[in-house]
Image (tube, rainbow, N blue to C red):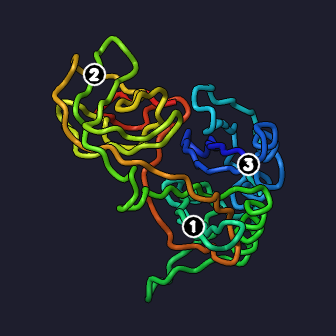
Amino acid sequence: MGLFKSIWHFSGPEGAGWEEVFSDGSTTATDAAVFPTSNVAITRMGMAHPTVTLNSVSVRDLNNRNLPPVVYPINLSGTGLPAAQGPANTDEAAVIRLGCKNTAGTIRSSRFVWVRGLVENALERAEVSGAMKVSAEFGTAVSRWYAALANANYGTNPRLRATWDGPLFRRAIDTITGSPAQDTTIIKTKVPHGLGANSLIQINDTSKKILPGLRGLFQVVAFTADTVTVRYRCAQADPPASGYLYHYEPASFCVVDPATCGIFKLGSRQTKKSVGGSRGRRSATRLRK
């Protein structure tokens, strides 16, 4: 099984734009490219107002992170009902919980997706109680979307820290070697780490001021017995070292389970023109592939 990250790019009324991100457990990159133009896209746009367009889908191969994402034009308009209704405010979203499980049913996970671009009265709040009301048309459309996601092998890719007793649970950082002129940084641990190429690690407790953006998940691109190389550009040469390195083990891919999916709430969040505009302020430069 492959593992792909699919980023869906939408546009709506008055120049609004947003993205929806999914994990895709397709067998090959070709399969991942086909799914956005299949029933997944059709059922997703069945929840959207006709003024909303699914412009494109970017697919990144997470097992080959050095490869650039491939962008597939879609240009599919919404078909949400009732057709006579106007569009909802694009800052409003149906916050949907996608429940997922692995093939054996032994691992379960979930994630929340903010689904925007709805028909005006798809979701409403009762005037007195404030309870959420779901229109019959939207309820039917979202159920079809759950089934399509499951059939297309969309879901979640949960990660597990190595156990406390395991040899790879945590390693203290000894030195950090990098510079503003290079895109990679070498992290030396105080004892051998036992990791290999493409291992997934989490770095914690480093200085936010000296090493902004170094905290978080990284993939090992090179290694020795006591060093790992990650894609990160240091703000200064050979900064003071601190923190810990944790090893993450991939769990079984979990596919959407329609029986455990549901609409969590009616949410509101300001959208941005995500395809061509700012996605917000960033405090650090992260170079991850």
- Quarter assignment of residue 13: top right
Find out whether the residues at labels 2 and 1 contact each other: C-beta distance under 8 Å.
no
Q: Amino acid at mark 2?
A: Thr
Nearest to the eye among marks 2 and 1: give it.
2
Q: Amino acid at mark 1?
A: Ile
Q: Which residue is mark 1?
A: 96
Q: Position of residue 180 (x, y in %)?
A: 29, 15
Element under disc 2: strand
Q: Which residue is mark 3?
A: 1
Going 54% across and 43% down the picture, which residue do you hit? 16
Q: Is residue 281 left or right of residue 76?
A: left
The correct choice, above or below, for 259 with respect to 10 in the image is: below
Q: Is residue 190 left or right of residue 143?
A: left
Q: Which residue is mark 2?
A: 177
Q: Amino acid at mark 3?
A: Met
Report the Cα–Cα distance between label 3 and label 1: 26 Å
Going 19% across and 38% down the picture, which residue do you hit? 242
Element under disc 1: strand
Going 43% across and 38% down the picture, which residue do you hit? 218
Q: Position of residue 94 (x, y in %)?
A: 56, 65
Circle 3 Cα neighbour tier, 10 Å, few/some/many (<14 / 14–19 / ≥20): few
Q: Is residue 189 left or right of residue 248?
A: left
Residue 172 visible in the displayed image: yes
Going 47% across and 58% down the picture, which residue do you hit? 160
Residue farthest along the top direction in this orientation: 181
Report the Cα–Cα distance between label 2 and label 3: 36 Å
Q: Position of residue 96 (x, y in %)?
A: 57, 67
Circle 2 Cα neighbour tier, 10 Å, few/some/many (<14 / 14–19 / ≥20): some
Nearest the eye: 127 or 235: 235
Residue 10 visible in the displayed image: no
Q: Position of residue 286 (x, y in %)?
A: 39, 30
